Image (cartoon, helix red, strand yellow):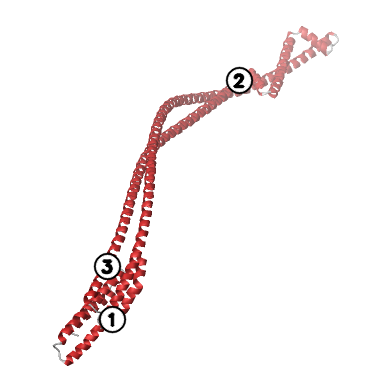
Amino acid sequence: MRPSTKAALKARVREYENLQRSQHHRDADPFERIETRSQYLEDLLRLYQTEAETLAAEKERASKTSEHELSREIDRLTDTNYHLSQKLKAMHEEVATLRAERERDVSEVTAGFQRQLQRNQERLKMSSAAMQNENAVLKAKVEQLEAYVREQRALEQAEEEVRVVELQYHVDDLRNELAEKRAEVEVERRERTALEDELALLRQQQHEMITFIDALDDTAARVQDMRDRGKETHGQLVEMLLRSSQALLKEHIEASEKAELEQARIQAARGVAPMDTGDRRASTAKSDPVNDKLSEATRLLQQRQEALRSSAAAQAEEERRGAKKGQDRESQRNPASTLASAIATLRSALEAQQIEVALAARVALDAHEATLRETQGKLLNSYAQCELLVARTAELDRQAAEAREQCAAERDRALNLRDQAVLQLRTRDVRENARARRHVETQTVAARSATSQHVATASAATAQRESTGAPATAASAAAPRDHPAHHHASGAGGPRSTSDKA
């Protein structure tokens, strides 16, 4: 064999081996692999035929030795050509079998695909109807939501207006109440000022009363001193009177005794019988004016002594009876004690009146301060309520704004959801329709291309076999190396792969 033919064979074998090792060849359709191997074998057959023709042409010009070598080469090429022809025949039979199976599989796949396509179309129609119904339901829901949002917005606006009016009325009431409280505070302030002036006047009167009571105390002290001195003088006078009365009585007794003795002596001298003591006293009293005066003085002295004793007993008895009666008797007996008791009574009355006035003023001042504190607390509560109402109004305004924003956001979200749902439905319909069309077109194109390729390959192989004539008897060196791959591709990969793909 010529070197150029060997180089061509080696290059073609290497190219086919590289193609078998490639990922594209492994992932290709079994029909494509069979067609590739058929093309490879046809190329080898063509190279061998060309080499056989060339060697036959050179056979005439070569020597016997070269004829012998050429004949051996021709025999070997003929054997190789025969083996290749047998392989090509087996491959044509396998191609026919595969074509029949392919047609059967294609018909089955086409029928299944038509059924699947019909089911998909029915399912698509049902899904389209369901989506239309769902779109209608969603549209109705969106309209209901919009109506509900509008109604809620109207209700909230009405409630907000009513709340604002109520708050305005309440604020007006609080302002009126605040004005009334301010007027009451002003009146109470005036009353407090009047009470403070009255308290100052009472304090001044109290000071004057205290000054008057101090003056009365001084006067009472002087009166008491005068009464004590009068008592001492009265006692001295009584003692002097008693002493003088006793002295006069003693002198009178002595004078009467001397007169009686003198009368007795005279009578004895005259010779008259002496009289007894009573008769002498009677006669002396009747006859002597001095004796009358002495008896009168004695009688008066005794009356005075009896009066002093009775007055002392009555005073003690009156002191035992009671303080008031004793004071009355003492006042009847002594004007100084009457004045002291009156001063003491007046002082106690003034002190009681002062205490009562101070207590009344203190109670009125405490009540006024309590009222002021209560009014101040009410005012503070009113201010706090006003502040709370202002804060509540601001909070309600903020909540209303948030509610409006939330309603707008909900409406936008509902519109976005509606648009997204419509877009998803349309996108899904478009995708399903496109996927179905692509699947149908891909299956149809694949079936048509496979069928046309097999037909073209079989026609080319038939034409090549008819053009080459009788099968060659030469054997090729590369064919045994490709034989297992051919059996693997034809026997194991063809129909099963085709059925699996279908």
In the rendered view, does 228 fall on the left or right side of 368?
A: right
Q: Which residue is mark 3?
A: 455
Q: Earlier in the sequence, mark 3 or mark 1?
A: 1
Q: Earlier in the sequence, mark 3 or mark 2?
A: 2
Q: Which residue is mark 2?
A: 338
As drawn, 92 above or below 387: below
For the N terminus, the quadrant is bottom left
Residue at the image point whose x is 78% and y is 15% from the top: 257
As drawn, 409 above or below 43: above
Q: How far from the left and from the top, in percent, is residue 396?
A: 39, 37
Q: How far from the left and from the top, in percent, is residue 427?
A: 32, 51
For the C terminus, the quadrant is bottom left
Q: Assess disc 1: are there few (<14), some (14-19) or many (≥20) residues with their C-alpha within 10 Å of its C-alpha.
A: many
Residue 477: tell me if it is visible. no
Count of labels shown?
3
Q: Assess disc 3: are there few (<14), some (14-19) or many (≥20) residues with their C-alpha within 10 Å of its C-alpha.
A: some
Residue at the image point whose x is 60% and y is 22% from the top: 341
Q: How far from the left and from the top, in percent, is residue 169?
A: 41, 29
